[in-house]
Image (spheres, coloured by chain):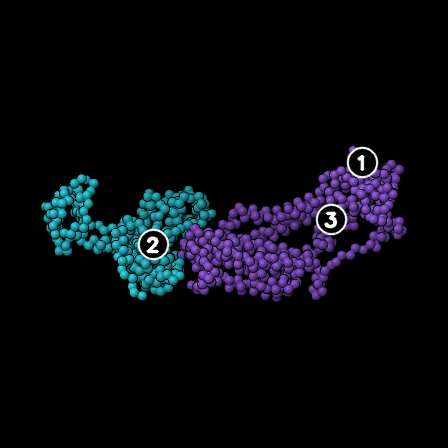
Chain colours: A purple, B cyan
Amino acid sequence: MSSILGLIIAREYLTRVRRRAFLIGTLLMPVLSALVIGFVGFMASQTEGETKVLVIDRSGLITRWDDGYNAWVPTHPDCFPERADLTYRFAEEPLADSTFMNSDFDAMVDFDDAIVQHGKAMLYYERSPGVVVQGKIQSDLSQAIERFRVKSELALDYETYKRLKMKVSLVGQDIVTKDRGATGRAVIGFVFSLTLFMLISIYGAQIMRGVIEEKANRIVEVIISAVKPRVLMAGKIIGVGLVGLTQFVAFIVIGWAMTALGGFLFEQSGLIGGDTALQGAGLDWKSWLASQDELSFLLDVNWGVMALATAAFFVTGYTLYASLFAAVGAAVSEESDAQYLMLPVMLPLIASYVMASTAMQDPEGTMAVVGSFVPFSAPVMMLIRIPLGVPLWEVLLSLLGVSLTAVLVVIFAGRVYRVGLLMHGKRPTFMELFRWMRHRS
Amino acid sequence: MSSVIQVEGVSKTYRGHRALKGVSLEIPQGGVFGLLGPNGAGKTTLIRMLAGITAPDEGRIAFFGEPLERHHQMRVGYLPEERGLYKTMKVGEQGIYLGQLRGLSRAEAIRRLKVWFERLEVDGWWNRPVSDLSKGMAQKIQFITTVLHEPDLLILDEPLSGFDPINAQRIREVVRALSEQGTTILLSTHDMPSVEEMCSTVTLVHQGEVLLAGGVSKLREQARQGRVRVVFEGEAIGFTAALGAAAELISLRSMEHPRHHEAILRLPESADWPEWVKWLASEVRLIACEPYATSMREIFIQAVEAKSAEPLPAT
């Protein structure tokens, strides 16, 4: 019988994995996700070419006349670095509108000594520069004015001022576990639970469609004359589940390869060195990541444990839901009839996804904790908590709960499946389904 | 002759409907066994039990003397009335899969499939998906996957439906050949000429009960009830006058030839057949005189109608 089960698993697995759609989906999904993220980032960093700005310092706060250049130059040139997308020229008097329009300047920033009080400068343009460029101009100008004020009002050396200046950021830490970066890691947990939710929904629905197809084209009668219905159901669930696991592993491998490649390209690009303080330090991207307050939690996530936990909860959670989907497929004759039976199956799954997205804000809250032990929501909910450091016994207990429930569901769904396979025509009522569940053999 | 299948007192109830009511029958080894009955008689229920899909509520089924169990299905081939294949799978792969499910090794399944594909002229379709096949072609593939593992018992439920006359004849020949090679065949069909042509024994079920059972020739002989068929040349009035009380005239009709008539008569039990023919030949110009061949169709209809005419049992 085990060889028969193997045959069924192999058929279910191979017919799906060999499909072009599977290959394309598995390979393209991570690549497309990365491309979309990369594209958005790239577009955000891009401006429409070089922007040339004329800075009008009417009161001579941040500029001085340079005889050598025969032009106004910034008192502190490092406040106005030359960039590929932004260059500055300086003047004491603004250009007349017509002269400005005929010049090669794209924008004109105008201020006098009142800027020290109200902190505002006028930006004139014919066509508004992009948000990113405006941000850079604002930041450059703020720094220059700040340097002027440090010097004139505090009579301090700017380097001394920089040393004194403080920027406070909040770093969360669990008082018991001494854990930091919990919120960030809850997001990572959510990404995994979202992946699990998608895998269970997609492959659960595939089981259902597969059963309906077998039933509709009547081949099931030939198959179950040679194979016990429960073996057929098990083969189908395992075979399709392996397809899901294959895809999950492929995502992990491709994701890992892309991260490594992205990290390498990032190092090569010199972007890490953009921060002058770290320039020339020969940093790799991991050290760079560790130095970033907002991102350092990524290094604290135990990715191996996450992958393992996702796989374990996938196997148990998927078995639980897949057998329900199989029963739904067997109970109906056409896919359109399946809708009303799908609802009670999908409802706990969707509810756990919604709860998970809320629990992300409060991963140790009552809802998250309770949800991670209720067998129907545990697979999706527990994954949010795991990156925060859940005691092993809690994970195992939750896993045990899901497994035991899955066994029970498999038994009852198996009965519905066996009876339903040979029923055609009128779709069964819920009462009939309960009667089928009591049907032992 | 030993029996392949012995069904004893089998009953089955679905959703309050008694599909089978204590059915007993025996399928002898070798030959073609016809399972007949009107729609809803319980044939499919019985067949599904023999194919191991459902179990009886009461009664016993034996396969070669042993209680029928799952492992016996490796020796059974089953072609259900409503059939199908996995549409997206390739023809060859599907054949191998179904063969392996019935216990064949992959290599053996491939070897036998190639032989059968050539025999039924479907070679060249090996790598095509089933969705590309015509209905008749798909039927042939299904037939092949049913017989591939060389079962001892082959259950064929309406095997000829969907075939054109040429392919139907080819399948008939294959079934006959398999029967000659020792395969026992259970044929369930509404096509009575096929029953007359192929079946050695039949069982007629109706409303979940066995109405008739026995050898085809014996049943036909029993149903003849002393009837003879006579074709003569001459006037019908003269014939009936000459017949007098010597035989009961059941029917008389003109034939295509303007002076030829066909009469169905019933002879008295005491009649001496050679003497009677000699006497008739002296009275009319006799063209043919033979025992009346009762059709299975007639037997079927008579038995079912007689059962339906019975008063309902008091409850």
Chain hosting mark 1: A
Mark 3 Cα within 10 Å, few/some/many (few <14, many 20+)?
many
* Left or right of residue A433: residue A103: right
Which mark, by number, is residue A97?
A: 1
Residue linked to disc 2 = B39
> Of tags 1 and 2, which is closer to the observer?
1
Chain hosting mark 3: A
Mark 2 Cα within 10 Å, few/some/many (few <14, many 20+)?
few
Q: Which badge, 1 or 3, comes first in the chain's sequence?
A: 1
Placement of the C terminus of chain B among the 4 image quadrants: bottom left
Up the image or down, A337 lies above or below A61; here it is below
Residue A144: x and y in percent read: 83, 46
> Of tags 1 and 3, which is closer to the observer?
1
- The answer for how far apart the CA atoms under marks 2 and 3 are is 80 Å
Residue at 48% of width from left, 53% of height from top? A337
Mark 1 in CB contact with mark 2 (< 8 angstroms): no
* Left or right of residue A334: residue B50: left
> Of tags 2 and 3, which is closer to the observer?
2
Residue A1 seen from this side: no
Residue linked to disc 3 = A272
> Residue type at mark 3?
Ile
* Left or right of residue A46: residue A210: left
Up the image or down, A47 lies above or below A205; here it is above
Residue B109: x and y in percent read: 41, 50
